[in-house]
């Protein structure tokens, strides 16, 4: 009888440990440790050709307990030098969008599908306007990192910024114009845990190039806030940034 009780306790304890080890149940420290380990892997990664030309790898920034993870395409000129995502003109616009949503860089997590700077001409790394979208091979080599970051954070919502991010995370070939603004699902690698709702929207750089897209982005961000059960801070705050700011960075990709 005593042996049976001991066995029962052991089974209960193993079940409890299995549940506690799910990322959804991790404490802040466990999430941070997982993200730090991933960052170390990323900065020493040589998994694709971009390793040869990057200045700094760009793992991602933000809270390990973020309710929202924003995923862009890849680092650009500024990000390559600073090792941080979305620090150029498009990044400043993303900061303003976050502020209007009542969020901040510190309260969300921001990352890219590829972690190193894709350049049109890697022999001229000092040239501006030398950015290009990552190739399918580069995306395939790198996407595991962002998937593991998402798994460690277990956010309530993912926002895909641009077509590259949306297509990579959703595994679709549909154009962004078809999938933008419609909830989709990110299925975690290995099928563990519930799918995470995904909102595909335009990349802030697209907004810089075409001011007419800003209404669609605001509509998408309001849907994200509603999914989080948060009120939009108010019509006076939740308005697109000024046209001058939009035009100023019109040539900037990230
Ligand atoms: S882009 Fe990704 S896979 Fe390629 S070297 Fe950088 S971290 Fe590694």
Image (tube, grey):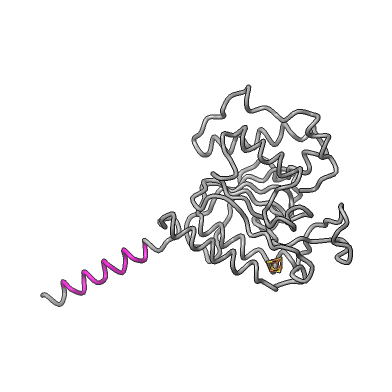
| Residue at the image position 67 percent from the left and 66 percent from the top | 142
| Magenta span: chief secondary structure | helix
Question: 110 above or below 38?
Answer: above
In percent of width and height, residue 254 lies at 76, 48
Residue found at the far top of this picture: 236
Magenta run includes residue 12: yes
Using the image, determine if residue 225 lies above or below residue 5: above
Residue 56 in the image: state x and y as whole percent: 71, 62
Q: Quadrant of residue 94?
A: top right
Looking at the image, is 41 positioned above or below residue 100? Answer: below
Q: Which residue does the image show at 15% across and 77% down from the upper left?
A: 3
x and y, in percent, of residue 11 in the image: 26, 70
Q: Residue at x 69, y 43 (%)?
A: 201
Question: x%, y% of residue 39?
Answer: 59, 64
Location of the N terminus (image quadrant): bottom left
Q: Quadrant of ligand 1?
A: bottom right
Which residue is at the far bottom?
Answer: 3
How many tags in the picture? 0
Viewer-closest of 5 and 35: 35
Location of residue 2 by image quarter: bottom left
Asked if residue 82 lies in the magenta stretch, the reply is: no
Q: Report the span colored magenta.
A: 5-19
Q: Residue at x 53, y 54 (%)?
A: 195
Relative to the observer, which residue lies in front, 60 or 182?
60
Q: Is residue 76 left or right of residue 29?
A: right
Q: Which image quadrant is residue 112 in? A: bottom right
**Quick one: 41 or 127, which is closer to the camera?**
127
């Amino acid at each position: 009888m005593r042996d049976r009780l001991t066995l029962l306790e052991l089974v209960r304890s193993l079940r409890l440990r299995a549940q506690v080890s799910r990322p959804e149940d991790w404490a802040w420290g466990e999430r941070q440790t997982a993200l730090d380990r991933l960052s170390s892997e990323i900065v020493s990664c040589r998994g694709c050709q971009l390793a040869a030309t990057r200045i700094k790898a760009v793992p991602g920034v933000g809270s390990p307990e973020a309710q929202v993870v924003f995923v862009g395409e890849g680092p650009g000129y500024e990000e390559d030098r600073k090792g941080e995502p979305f620090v150029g003109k498009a990044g400043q616009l993303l900061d303003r969008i976050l502020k209007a949503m009542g969020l901040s860089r510190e309260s969300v997590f921001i990352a890219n599908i590829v972690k190193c700077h894709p350049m049109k001409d890697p022999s001229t790394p000092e040239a501006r306007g030398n950015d290009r979208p990552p190739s399918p091979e580069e995306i395939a080599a790198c996407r595991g990192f962002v998937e593991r970051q998402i798994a460690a954070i277990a956010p309530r919502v993912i926002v895909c910024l641009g077509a590259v991010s949306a297509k990579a995370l959703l595994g679709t070939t549909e154009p962004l114009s078809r999938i933008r603004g419609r909830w989709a699902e990110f299925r975690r690698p290995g099928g563990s845990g519930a799918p995470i709702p995904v909102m595909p929207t335009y990349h802030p750089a697209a907004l810089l190039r075409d001011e007419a897209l800003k209404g669609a982005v605001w509509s998408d961000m309001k849907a994200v806030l509603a999914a989080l059960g948060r009120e939009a801070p108010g019509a006076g705050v939740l308005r697109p940034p000024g046209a001058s700011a939009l035009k100023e960075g019109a040539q900037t990709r990230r």
